[in-house]
Image (cartoon, rainbow, N blue to C red):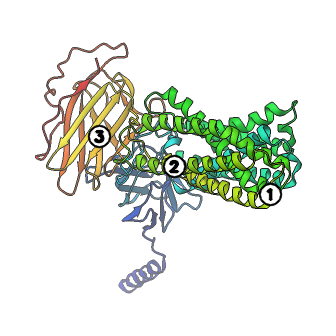
Amino acid sequence: MVAAGLGLLLFDLAVGSARPALAQNTLEESDPADGAVLNSSPSQIALTFTEPIGDANQVSIACGAGGDNDPFTQRGDEVVAANGRALTVEIQQPIPAGRCQVSWQVSEPGGEPGIDGSFSFTVQELPPTLPPGTGTPTSTASSSSGGTADDGDSVGDASEASDATTWLGRVLSTFGVAVLFGALVLIVAAWPEGPEYIVAVRFLRAVWVIALVGTLVYVVALTAAVNDESFGKGLNPSGWLDLLDAGWAGRAAIARLVLVVASGWVVLRPERVIDPTTQLPAIGIPALAAVTLGLSRTGGDWAVLGVIAGIAHALAMSIWIGSVVLLARVVLAGPGEEDLVHAVRGFGRISGTVIVVTVVSGLIQLFRLDGGELFSESHGRVLLLKTLLVAAMVFVTLTANQVVQTRLTRASELSVPMADRLRRAFGTQAVLGVGVLALSGWLLALEPGKLPAEEGPDFAIREEIVDEDAGIDLVVQLDPGRVGVNRLRVEVREPETGLDGLQVTFIPPVGSNAGSVVQAIPLTGVGIADSGPPPAGGVPLDVAGAWTLQVSASTATGSLTGAGSSFEVRAADGSLPTSDIASVPTGAPVTPAPTTAPPPSSTNAP
């Protein structure tokens, strides 16, 4: 019996050892990987396990600067893949900059509790734009640029575009439009035989092509600039309409493109400019295109006068430069009959008027935009250089006109020596004119000395936070300061760079059921972050009363933790609850760090 029992025991052990052991489930990989540093927010959190998992799973995400991470709630539910081994969580709104801790727990296929674990990753910076309604401000100036703010969902100001591609497109467009219009004016005024010359027709068509290509480049580059996108994305015609919201410079660019395209009707048959039945639209379309050249700078003092002077300057300069280019390249290309003499004489008759209008309108713009800042500002210095080139053009033009009056008054044809001499004179003017146009394009990329800085919107609530030890100086503003979603604007004035983990927390009045609102601010130095007006963005302040503002951030020289002040949020009808804003209620979680400056006083709108 003992032997039989011992044999049965040995048999059970042998059989048991032959049974496969259940494998221990483990996390095979995660995306993002543990310790990963990401340039932007991931679109999902993905976990892959070595064995199948059940349906009772939990994934929690906590994100924020430093070690005080807050739950990240803008996420989807846990989804198990068809193979049973992968678990994903969709990120519905971008994760703020900072470190994120992901904690997970999965179940067994039968529903029993399974394994758990955690990992972390870091998001370096917030994406430049966020979907409407997130309430998260959008950074409109990097720490190195020190730029100004624009709403996250709006386009920039076209008049502020200053990159090289925009300048090139602007100069080519201006040259083509100006020469086309000026040449047609000279044909109408003094050379009606011009459309009969094939060289003149080819000249007009070549200039139109330059105008069209230059304007296309200008519109594409301007679209990319106001949307802060690449030149390639600006090629999409659907984005060009954004220029309509980019100020008068943007609207003028769109109008110019349409008018330049329409001018093709004129250059296809240039005789239309001398035909009484078609003369008005044939000269009017290029003239309107030239008018758009004067709408690139509409700000500053005496804005209406500036617009009038700008348009007059653009038209007069176009006639001047366009006429001399036509004379140098076509009319004076060689000797000819009396009609060529009439063309040269005709320019002499109109040149005096266009010179006076160009100079007077230019002086108006000079004093309006620069005043006495000609030597201290870049715009003024470039304007002085342009003025010297214009003065040289005036001198050469007057000299050439004197030669025309003395040598061609009674001439019936244009001789070879005279054509060569005048061609050199008008060619010099044309070269100077191209230089003037190039400098004009440069001027539009510079800020005039007297052009007032664009003021931001008025905010009902303004709180200044200054900490000298940490080197932090910033302003937090809210509007309208009433119950509901409020526009948030944060301006960092110091430090220039090195700001980390900037976060603004809004704590509701004591005793209310509202929750705190934590807002990560995507700035790392001097700049402005603006959520834009509701409903596109903002922070929800759901109850009226004395709210507490806390700001946390760190620099290379110190940290700012919980620096705060109190401010009043009014009810929707503008009324205030009975509260004393002069003191922070007892128990409010305001605990300034040792390096924190005393809470500054608030400046509230009445």
Q: Amino acid at mark 2?
A: Asp
Q: Alpha-carbon distance for marks 3 and 2?
A: 26 Å
Residue on which disc 1 sits = 415
Q: Amino acid at mark 1?
A: Ser
In the picture, which quadrant includes the N terminus? Answer: bottom left
Q: Alpha-carbon distance for marks 1 and 2?
A: 56 Å
Q: Which is in the foreground here, disc 3 or disc 2?
A: 2
Marks 3,2: beta carbons within 8 A: no
Q: Position of residue 100 (x, y in %)?
A: 35, 55
Q: Earlier in the sequence, mark 1 or mark 2?
A: 2
Residue 516 in sight: no
The residue lying furthest to the bottom in this view is 3
Q: Which mark is residue 154?
A: none
Q: Position of residue 604 (x, y in %)?
A: 26, 23
Q: Residues within 10 Å of mark 1 (few under 14, many from 20)?
A: some
Horizontally, residue 117 falls left or right of residue 179, namely left
Residue 456 in sight: yes
Residue positioned 35% across, 50% down in the render? 62
Check the image and report above or below for 464 versus 34: above
Check the image and report above or below for 534 versus 518: above
Horizontally, residue 579 falls left or right of residue 108, namely left
- Camera-nearest residue between 558 and 208: 208
In the picture, which quadrant includes the C terminus? Answer: top left
Q: Earlier in the sequence, mark 1 or mark 3?
A: 1
Q: Position of residue 358 (x, y in %)?
A: 57, 38
Horizontally, residue 325 falls left or right of residue 300, namely right
Residue on which disc 3 sits = 504
Residue on which disc 2 sits = 228
Q: Amino acid at mark 3?
A: Val
Q: Which is in the foreground here, disc 1 or disc 3?
A: 1
Quarter of the image for residue 416 reads bottom right
Q: Earlier in the sequence, mark 3 or mark 2?
A: 2
